[in-house]
Amino acid sequence: MDGSGWGPVKRTRTFEDVLAQIERRIAEDGLTAGDRLPAERRLAEQLGVSRSSVREAMRVLETLGVVSSQVGRGPDAGAVLIARPDSALTGLLRLHLGLATLELREVIDTRHMIEQWAAARAASARAGGEALAAALAGMDAARTAEEFVEHDTAFHCALADASGNRLVSAVMRSLRDTMRKFSVEAVERLGDTAILRAGHVRILAAIEAGDPGEAAAAVSEHLADAYPELFTH
Amino acid sequence: MDGSGWGPVKRTRTFEDVLAQIERRIAEDGLTAGDRLPAERRLAEQLGVSRSSVREAMRVLETLGVVSSQVGRGPDAGAVLIARPDSALTGLLRLHLGLATLELREVIDTRHMIEQWAAARAASARAGGEALAAALAGMDAARTAEEFVEHDTAFHCALADASGNRLVSAVMRSLRDTMRKFSVEAVERLGDTAILRAGHVRILAAIEAGDPGEAAAAVSEHLADAYPELFTH
DNA sequence: CTCCCTGCTATGGTCTGACCATATTGTGGT
DNA sequence: ACCACAATATGGTCAGACCATAGCAGGGAG
């Protein structure tokens, strides 16, 4: 494919070439979010490489958040779509956390930092009220701990989203995802979710009132309520 | 329509299982930087999957910066090395920035959040003074903007380290690394580093004095000095 | 004419088995 | 003691196969 290469040794692996080619193709064809890439077999044929190499390139693109990890089947519909790269950090942090033997305490610590900051931001901008209220309603309708945590996660992610910083938002999402299992246990151990609800209501009220200080304080106390044994002031 | 959005029945592909298994193995065996993973063929055999799946998992780990991408050949020496987890976020974040429209403003915004928080923590614990002082001395001895930024980076990373939270520390390192080039330009544009030095001194003093509020305020003003056009209060 | 049912087909996901160039290691000869 | 060379295991790559699935086309029933 290169023509001039093949001199001393082949320095780049095939899948790296494929990556470059796909990248070039995306740029040239002006593909944007929602568009599809050719099927793996077609790409392999067009680029003159094996499907294995194309697949390895795909895994990289997927990890980078360039293409969606959707498992599409069937003809035509199966090809890969280009997603919004917003979620790029998610998979990474999950692995990163698992690998580095991080303690849950550090995760909650970090959440404390992020959510306090995000709540203050949201209050200043009086933003995110609808999403927070929706999550609150979802929690009220929840019947199991899992359902509750599901909407609780939505609430806290909405909080991060309301900050308007996508990077913070992505990190927050990863953290919540990482501790989802633990959160379910925590809720079950707590038994009563009334105190959590009170915290959420207070946070939402502070944001809608546009009071950053109160919002931050509310978040702080809410996390202390939720994780009494792990919280650090 | 899935209903819950997050699809309770997410089919996991084989390479994802492999990913989890490797992750578990790393944690259990306590592998650290420089250690080797088993060879691809051995892993495949041990996990009961094909080498293709192992290889796809490897590409993911490599993209995530968990293992090195060194092209090792030969028996025994060929297996994969585990890199420093510090860099796990880095490569991804850099590419993330290249591919997405994540603005520098958001990065600095995030730094503001992290460093304020970390400085307050460090002040409460009166921790990290030595590392900060060393970085300060390095900045004083710097002759070029690059050298200055080098030690400036060390200073701000030391700040994050002083918080005692490794997760925050890792994110901070990635952010600094991501904006290193820009930082050099910023310093060159600023011309005079005296104002930056004053900020660093003030931060260090506040930490050594054990004054969290002052430490946070000092960080805030320091960042405003360094990135006047990008700073958000 | 419309509507549903049933195959056909292309897709991603996975596995098997093979070949190559290389790097380490052990062995034999000098 | 030293060096050359074969054995061996590695990562990189390829070709071909199978599976479950999802869309589409065509045919039969109403």
Image (cartoon, coloured by chain):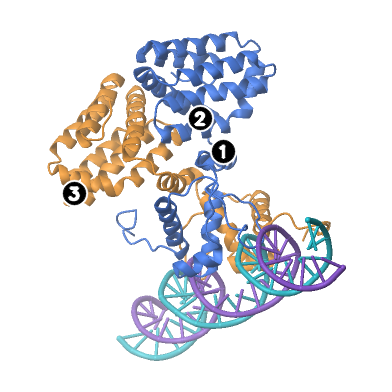
Chain colours: A orange, B blue, C purple, D cyan
Q: In x, y percent, where is residue B223?
A: 50, 18
Q: Which residue is labeled 3 in the image?
A: A142
Q: Are marks 3 and 2 on the same chain?
A: no
Q: In x, y percent, where is residue B217?
A: 41, 13
Chain letter of disc 2 in the image:
B
Q: Amino acid at mark 2?
A: Val
Q: Is residue A134 left or right of residue A59?
A: left
Q: In x, y percent, where is residue A21?
A: 68, 55
Label 2: which secondary element:
helix
Q: Is residue A64 left or right of residue D5?
A: left
Q: Amino acid at mark 3?
A: Ala
Quadrant (top left, top right, bottom left, bottom right) of the N terminus of chain A: bottom right
Which residue shows up at 45% across the image and 70% down it?
B48
Please tell me how many numbered marks the rendered image carries: 3
- Which circle's residue, 1 or 2, is located before the other in the chain? 1
Q: Residues within 10 Å of mark 3 (few under 14, many from 20)?
A: some
Label 1: which secondary element:
helix
Note whether B175 is above or below D20 in the view shown.
above
Chain letter of disc 1 in the image:
B
Q: Select label 3 or label 2 by which is in front.
A: 2
Q: Which residue is labeled 1 in the image?
A: B97
Q: Residues within 10 Å of mark 1 (few under 14, many from 20)?
A: some
State the residue in front, A58 or A201. Answer: A58
**Spatial distance from mark 1 to mark 3, Cα to Cα?**
38 Å
Q: Is residue A34 visible?
A: no
State the residue in front, A34 or D26. Answer: A34
Tag 1 near tag 3, CB within 8 Å = no
Q: Which residue is labeled 2 in the image?
A: B107
Quadrant (top left, top right, bottom left, bottom right) of the C terminus of chain A: top left
**Quarter of image, res B125:** top left
Chain letter of disc 3 in the image:
A
